[in-house]
């Protein structure tokens, strides 16, 4: 049996954060593919047995089901002693960016990409709102990366894996990062890590 | 000199999370009031000297500036040995709800309240989108609170202080919690904690 089982699916940036971490750690893991677009995560059964929050990813580790990608990343970094912070200050800095990602990046980019890239909606007031929000966040990220290869301590950490996730789907929603050269460079730094793979190479897509 | 200085303002639910924690801990703190609506957090000076993310709250503690309410709450819980998790599993459970708050609750409720309660906008496609999102999250919260007085370990923790923040402004955006009786009960449990105060009693409002 694999050490880890991950509930997720190809289109999920949040699942990708964990799948990428598992792959970069080089550990043995299997995917429990979720039929997201058929409503599986929002079903009573899923909420009762897998995750009351009705979300992916969920990681099964040591017989425990863990949810929220930030918690899972932190657990894996601690357990394997890799891609985490080495001091209390570094750990706080990593959490700071994971929270920023949850609050200002993945919510907004993920929502925008869902509407434009998956649902193929035309731009509308909601997509414009989300794009304006995520553009502000990309500017903050771009500035922070000035002269830095990665977000914290200039080495790859779980903060990078959280923040980068939906940005690897950029072609699906027309983001070229032309205005954010440091982000483009940083994404290439992540792609250059041994074991990196694109989301769709790590997890098959759920059917629409 | 106070042990803590908090950059924040009355209308900020994110600042309230930290102000409430400081008050419940009974520690000495002072407020550095931010002129949010005049753009102070988004100014180059603030971004350079206080918080590159352009946000409140910021806590100055032990000569260090800390940002992101979740990080600050975790730091304070650890330092004072109160309102945190007692085991690794409890700590993960607390972080799980803090992340959920950042991802699905405070972003959406905060955005909705800003438009409806502060900017006095009429309902529109964006407010409807935000309300639909936060209503889903309130349902998840309401269900979790079934038979529970607080979110984690049935005692007050920083998870509660994070999740409750914008809900104490509910009268400003017309949310009565009629459909969420467990949330109403839980908010009353928080109000009953020794030292609890409403946001506007802890921090003066920033001018519009």
Image (tube, coloured by chain):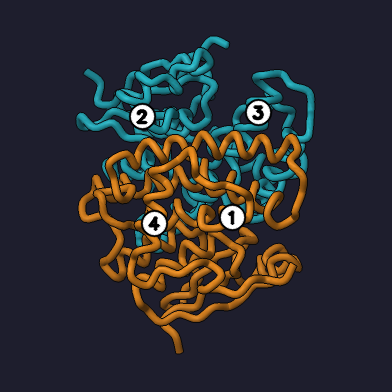
Chain colours: A cyan, B orange
Chain bearing tag 1 is B
Question: According to the image, label 1 marks what residue?
Answer: B171
SS category of the residue bearing label 1:
helix
Question: According to the image, label 3 marks what residue?
Answer: A113
SS category of the residue bearing label 2:
loop
Closer to us: mark 2 or mark 3?
2
Mark with earlier residue (2, 3): 2
Establish whether labels 2 and 3 are both on one chain.
yes
List x then y, in percent, for residue A11. 54, 21
Closer to us: mark 2 or mark 4?
4
Q: Tag 2: Cα neighbours inside 10 Å, few (<14), some, or many (≥20)?
A: many
Which residue is nearer to you in this view: B167 or B75? Answer: B167
Is residue B203 placed above or below B171 in the rendered structure?
A: below
Mark with earlier residue (1, 4): 1
Q: Tag 1: Cα neighbours inside 10 Å, few (<14), some, or many (≥20)?
A: few
Q: Quadrant of residue B193?
A: bottom left
List x then y, in percent, for residue B91. 29, 50
Question: According to the image, label 4 marks what residue?
Answer: B188
List x then y, in percent, for residue A44. 38, 21
Residue placed at 63% from the left, 39% from the top? B130
Chain bearing tag 2 is A
Q: Tag 4: Cα neighbours inside 10 Å, few (<14), some, or many (≥20)?
A: few
SS category of the residue bearing label 4:
helix
Establish whether labels 4 and 3 are both on one chain.
no
Question: According to the image, label 2 marks what residue?
Answer: A51
Chain bearing tag 4 is B
Closer to us: mark 4 or mark 3?
4
């Amino acid at each position: 049996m694999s050490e880890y089982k991950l509930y997720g699916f190809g289109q999920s940036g949040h699942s990708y954060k964990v799948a990428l971490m598992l792959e970069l750690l080089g550990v043995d893991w299997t995917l429990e593919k979720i039929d997201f677009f058929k409503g599986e995560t929002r079903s009573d059964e899923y909420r009762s047995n897998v995750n009351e929050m009705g979300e992916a990813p969920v990681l099964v580790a040591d017989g425990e089901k863990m949810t929220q990608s930030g918690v899972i990343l932190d657990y894996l970094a601690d357990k394997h002693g890799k891609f985490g912070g080495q001091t209390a200050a570094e750990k706080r800095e990593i959490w700071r960016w994971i929270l920023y990602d949850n609050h200002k990046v993945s919510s907004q980019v993920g929502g925008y990409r869902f509407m434009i890239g998956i649902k193929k909606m035309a731009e509308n007031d909601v997509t414009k709102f989300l794009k304006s929000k995520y553009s502000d966040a990309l500017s903050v990220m771009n500035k922070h990366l000035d002269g830095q290869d990665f977000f914290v301590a200039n080495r790859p950490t779980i903060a990078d894996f959280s923040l980068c996730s939906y940005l690897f789907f950029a072609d699906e929603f027309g983001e070229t990062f032309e205005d954010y050269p440091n982000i483009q460079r940083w994404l290439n730094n992540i792609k250059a890590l041994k074991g990196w793979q694109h989301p769709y190479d790590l997890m098959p897509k759920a059917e629409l």
